[in-house]
Every structure is written in structure tokens, then in C-alpha cells.
Amino acid sequence: MSEKNKPKNATSDKIEQLENYSVDYTDKPLTTRQGLKVNDTNNSLKAGVRGATLLEDFLLREKIHSFDHERIPERIVHARGSAAHGYFELTKSIEKYSKAGIFTDTSRKTPVFVRFSTVAGSKGSTDLARDVRGFAVKFYTQEGTWDLVGNNMPIFFIQDAMKFPDLIHSVKPEPNNEIPQAASAHDTFYDFVSRATETLHNHIWVMSDRGIPRSYRMMEGFGIHTFRLINAKGEAHYVKFHWKPKLGVHSVTWDEAVKISGADSDFHRRDLWDAIESGNYPEWELGIQVVAEADEHKFDFDLLDPTKLIPEEMVPVEIIGRMVLNKNPENFFAETEQVAFLPGNIVPGIDFTNDPLLQGRLFSYRDTQLSRLGSPNFHQIPINRPVTDVHVNQRDGHMQMDVPKGQTAYFPNALSGGCPYLSKVAEGGFESYQERIDAKKIRGRSESFSDHFSQPALFYRSLVDWEKEHVIAAYSFELGKCNHEEIKSRMLYIIAQIDTDLAEKVADNIGMKVPNDIERPMNQSIGADAVVEDHQPGEKKMYLEKSPVLSQSNTKFDTISTRQIAVLVADGFHMKSFEAMQKALEKEQAVIKLVAPHGGKVTCDEGMEHKVDAAISTTESVLFDAIYVPGGEKSIGKLKEQSKFIKFLNEAFSHCKAIAVDGEGEELLDASAIKDYKEDKALFINAEPKSFIKAISNHRNWERRKVAQKIPV
Ligand code: HDE
């Protein structure tokens, strides 16, 4: 990393605290865990050099014993993830809504640790699975730790925590053969989805491009549930939290996702790591949607129903702060693997609502840490320690790291002068919001949660053509992978309740017909005899034809920062044209990578040597956002000799990416299938870098998609 890019302000109370626990082995002798210096770690203690190993060998036993126990259980969901440190800054006080220090003090920089994840796959599965992404933020605030444990989609699959094990059991690999890994395209998932129609809203988001992000840095984040903000007067407002990425919301295509999974299954992990190492710190704005308590019932849906979003056109998102990630973890296991997020971690000024999914989560996360981390003392692990002081009466348990002083561990006490003592609300003591509840104890679901179809339909209507085509292709792929006709047929019937055109196109693709009706009872999400009709939207009070913010076509297209540009070169490439393009791209913070027929170095036409970033045999076009081919007769001649360079171009073109060529570079185009499409608006031949840059910032040229299908890849 260059000096210029070294994180200058990547320190914080949390980083300083972590440094107290960090261990540096530079210039240090190898020791045992007892601090004994070791002089041989290559040979076990034996009776003679060819003899049996002796039980006495405490060095062997310590080494192997520790190794045997290196693994802990992976998270039952969100096992695959990557994380980074950073900070949150409030840009606008929201004192009128919340008394939380983090929401009132604009001079604070609150340390954060953020973990992104997929949901269904195991710890070693591909980053590019079609899935929801976790977006979990731990704020180390001065009043205690607040965890906002969200996802990259604003809604969830189910309305009640009671159904979570069913949902996850249906999507995880099937129990008889443990197939498929990190994939929802299988019978058990669609068996469940087609019978539990509350899943459809989150499901259609997963079928959209949101399910295959280009980067963790190009995803939105959502707290999903409606929470409460409480101000100093004790007044409450409902709130939904949003993270808006500075780089906009962008995705890859399914064909790329499949290929990236083979070419670099750590694609998102590497992307996050590299961006931070190079000083291009990922950044999000924090926004809130606030609803007055008096307006709780003014919507067509229930604010407590986590399968519904509040359209931003109805309640605008107010931006109140920004989050920057500026430091990679020092150690994956110690930090990313051991971090324990708990939606129950809140601070005064923020509170829960009765959302039945949130209520269940308040139990699950603390519970799961016990089996994962093995002890109720998991909050003492350095990454989980708050930056505030902790004084508790809880004691003992596995791996107690503190040494609590004194005679007492209970309250009230006189022997320790009543310490640790209670705090009044005015002194920062937490008080739960006093919500009036007058109800019968009942196991059931509110009628106000019953509409399962209008929001998935709103989402689909709000997409533009290319996005709709991707959704159709995704449903067709997923159902195409199912074996049971009855499940596919039921799904087609259900999809038709969202949009008939969508259902018919999917039916055509999988060679079936949309049925007019299906076997009953069919909807078992609420009761065994519930039917689809029970979940159709009622008469709408506030009907929206479209919610444009839901479409990625309305995201930001104003930067090429950190976009990966492959420059195809061989010995003799034309230095002048390359240099001009390189300068222009790097000025916009794009990342240039030289891809050549071999590793090592290539020599340009001015006789200078240039380091090759990737030999063509080690890389694929799907790992890049755009391609540039500088001229040079000799260089192009060499590139033409290897069909993989032609494939590279064809494939990037088929994925609708921007391509620029200069001078003899055009001959490489002429050798590819692109030669017939030179009028394409994201294809540049001897053009100014400016237009190439604009096309990269547009992410893709979707207008090309019809011809793209004809390109052999
Ligand atoms: Fe989670 N979820 N979840 N979840 N969740 C876990 O906790 C659970 C839900 C989310 O990077 C587990 O520490 C239940 C919604 C993220 O470490 C577990 C229910 C949302 C992460 C658990 C939900 C999430 C988790 C597994 C339904 C978005 C990863 C390991 C009531 C708002 C956090 C762990 C990380 C992790 C349970 C629903 C997001 C088992 C029971 C809704 C981002 O406790």
C-alpha cells in the first residue's frame, strides 16, 4: 500500500482497545503456550530416530491438541461473510426524535465493525450465490454497544419468528444428500415458498439483480423491522433504517455470477479487502424513515409486518449520517468469525417494536452465540467488548477473562456499598418504552398482515425492462432446477398472482402452462386451510402504481472509482495510447490491471518493462468491469494467437460491459464476434477516454442485451 493511502484516521477507541489484545510475533522466539522457548518444532520425541513416539512429548501434544480444536461451529445462517472496521459520523442531529448520543452529537466519530454475508451457504461457499446479503453493523457507542443487524433488502421472507427454522431448513441443502450448496434452486425451497406466500416479497427481491450484487460496497442496507426512536421527553416515533452506498447499487448478471464462482469464489471478500487496502474506503449514508405514532395505521399494511416496506415516495428517507470502512481486520478468526451480533443490543434513545419477527430474534442471537462461541462470556472476546466500562454481577462460566474484585456478586448489597449501582434514566439508565398493551393472549396472526401480493407486485411493476428480464430468467432458472412438476405448477400459479405476464414467460421457459387453479388447501403459512384468496390485497387507501427508487436503473451512475479495468497487452503494445488512457482512468480512481499472454513483465513499444497483473490463463473477463486494448502491431499479433483473448472480449461484450480499443487493437475486435456490432454505444474505437469513462460509470449498456445473446461465449 502506498504511504498516501495508509489509513490516517483508521484509529478509534475500539481499535486502540483491540491493540491491547493484539500480539506481534516480529523478532520474537517461538514458545509454548506457557512461554517456554522451543528449540525443535519439526520432530516429535521418539525412542531412537526410527522408534515409537513417546507419551512424554508435551510439545507434540500441545501442538496437535490445539490444532484438533481450531474449528468452532459455523453460523447456522450467514456463515459466509467478511467484515471491516470503520466509523459512523452523524451529519444532522435528530434530537427531536432520539436522545441517543449517536443521534444527537455531531462531533462524535463512533467506531463500527460491519460484517457482510450470504445467508444459505456454508463458510467456504461462493460469494456469488443468488441470495440475500447480511449487513450487520456494530456501533461501539459511548453509552454501550448498539447492533443494527440488517440485510441488503428492506423486507424479510416471513412475518413470525416461529417460521424461521422452516424457512432455513427448506433453503439449506436437502437433508438426505446435502445438495445443493449455497443455492435456493431446489425442490424443498419451492415446496415451502409456494405454500407460505408471505415469502413472496423477499423472494422476488432475491430473484432480481439485488440477489447478485457486484460488490458489498454497492449494496443498500436495511434494518428491515420498524424500530422506535425515543427522545429526551420520552416521546416515541417509528423508524426504519436505510444504508445508501456512495457507489450506487449495482449487480452482476447470473451468467457472470456462475462464472465468477469458479474463477474467484472470494470475489466479494477480495473486493472489500482490496478497496480498503488501497485507501478507497467504502462509504454509506445512513437514512431514516420516520412515522409519527399517530400515523401508525394510515398505511395499507402493518408497520409491524416485516414483509412490507414503506415506499420512499410515501415517507422520504432523511439522510442523517455517514459510515466509512477504513480498516481491514488484523485476524479473520479473532474478529470476523468471533464477532457476535445481537439485535437485542440497544442504547437509550432506540427501542424495539412488537414486530413478531424482531421479538423472536431478541432470543435467538444470544442463544446461538452459546453454541458457536461456547460460553456466556462471549462479550469478553476483544471484538465483542464494548468501549464503555462493564460492571456486572454475572460471574464465572467458561473462559472468564476478567478478574472481578470484591466479596459480592448480587444486588442489592450493603457489603459493596450497593455497587455496582443503578442509574436513573436522567443519568443514562435504560428504560423500556412504556407501551400500552391491552390484549388477549393468543397464538395467531393479525388480519393486518394478510396481504401477501401487493408489494411483490409493486416491486415488479417498478422495475425497468432489463430488470424484469433478469427476474424472469431467475425464476425460470430456479424452477427449471426443481424436479417436482406439482411444485413448479403451484409456483407458476402463485407467481401469476403477482404478475400474469411474468408467470406466462416463466411457464414458457420451463415448458409448462400457468394453471387456472391448484389443489386445495394450498396455503399453509397461516392455517392448514388458508387459501391464496385470503392473502390478496384488500381495497387500497394509498395505491402506488410504481416506486421508482426500487429500480436499480435509478441508482447513482456518477463514478468509476474502484472499477476494475483489464488492459489486454503483449510485448510491443503502444505506450502512448496506453499512457493517456491509464492516466484518465486512474484520475477517476479506477483500478488498471495488465492482462498478458504470460506472467512476469511485458515490454512496450518504447522499450519499457511493465509488470503483468494476471496471465490470461489465471483470469477471466467476469472479474473485470471494462476492457481496454491499446494498439501495437506486435502486441495485437500475439494476442490474436490465443483464443482466450477473443473469448475475453466476446464474454465482456455479452455481459454488456464497456470496451475500448486503440489503433491495431481494432484487429482484435475484428477477430471476435463483436466485429458486427461496431455501432454499439459502449464500444469505443480510437475514442477519447472521456466517453469510455462515462460508459463504465453507467455500469452496463443494457440496450446491447438483445445482440449480446447472439455472442458465442
Ligand atoms: Fe438472523 N440470525 N435471524 N436475520 N441474521 C443470525 O445469529 C434469526 C433475520 C441476520 O454477521 C444468527 O450470530 C432468526 C432478519 C444477519 O454475524 C441467528 C430470525 C434479519 C446475521 C439468527 C432471523 C437477519 C444473522 C446466526 C427470525 C435482517 C449475521 C449466527 C426471527 C433484519 C450476523 C448469529 C453476522 C445471523 C437468527 C431473521 C439478519 C441463528 C431466529 C429479519 C445479518 O441467531
Image (cartoon, rainbow, N blue to C red):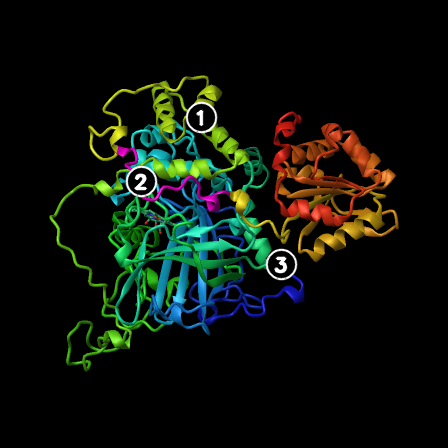
Can residue 350 be seen in the rendering of this structure? Answer: yes
CA separation in Å, label 2 and label 3: 50 Å
Residue type indicated by callout 1: Asp
Question: Which residue position is annotated with label 1?
Answer: 501
Between residue 86 and residue 427, name the one nearer to us. 427
Q: Helix, strand or loop at disc 1?
A: helix
The residue sitting at 57% across, 59% down in the picture is 281
What's drawn in magenta, residue-wise?
535-551
- Tell me, yes or no, whether the two marked residues, 1 and 2, touch with CB atoms within 8 Å: no
Q: Quadrant of residue 452?
A: top left
Which image quarter holds the C terminus?
top right
Please state which of the two labelled residues, at mark 2 or mark 3, is closer to the viewer.
2
Q: Which circle's residue, 3 or 1, is located before the other in the chain?
A: 3
CA separation in Å, label 3 and label 1: 46 Å
Residue 146 position, x and y percent, is: 36, 63
Between residue 6 and residue 62, name the one nearer to us. 6
Q: Helix, strand or loop at disc 2?
A: loop
Q: Residue furthest left?
A: 440
The residue sitting at 67% across, 43% down in the picture is 626
Residue type indicated by callout 3: Ser
Q: Which mark is residue 568?
A: none
- Tell me, yes or no, whether the two marked residues, 3 and 1, touch with CB atoms within 8 Å: no
Which image quarter holds the N terminus?
bottom right
Question: Which residue position is annotated with label 3?
Answer: 278
Question: Which residue position is annotated with label 2?
Answer: 540
Can residue 266 be seen in the rendering of this structure? Answer: no
Residue 113 position, x and y percent, is: 45, 60
Crowding around mark 2 (Cα neighbors within 10 Å: few <14, some 14 to 19, many 20+) is few
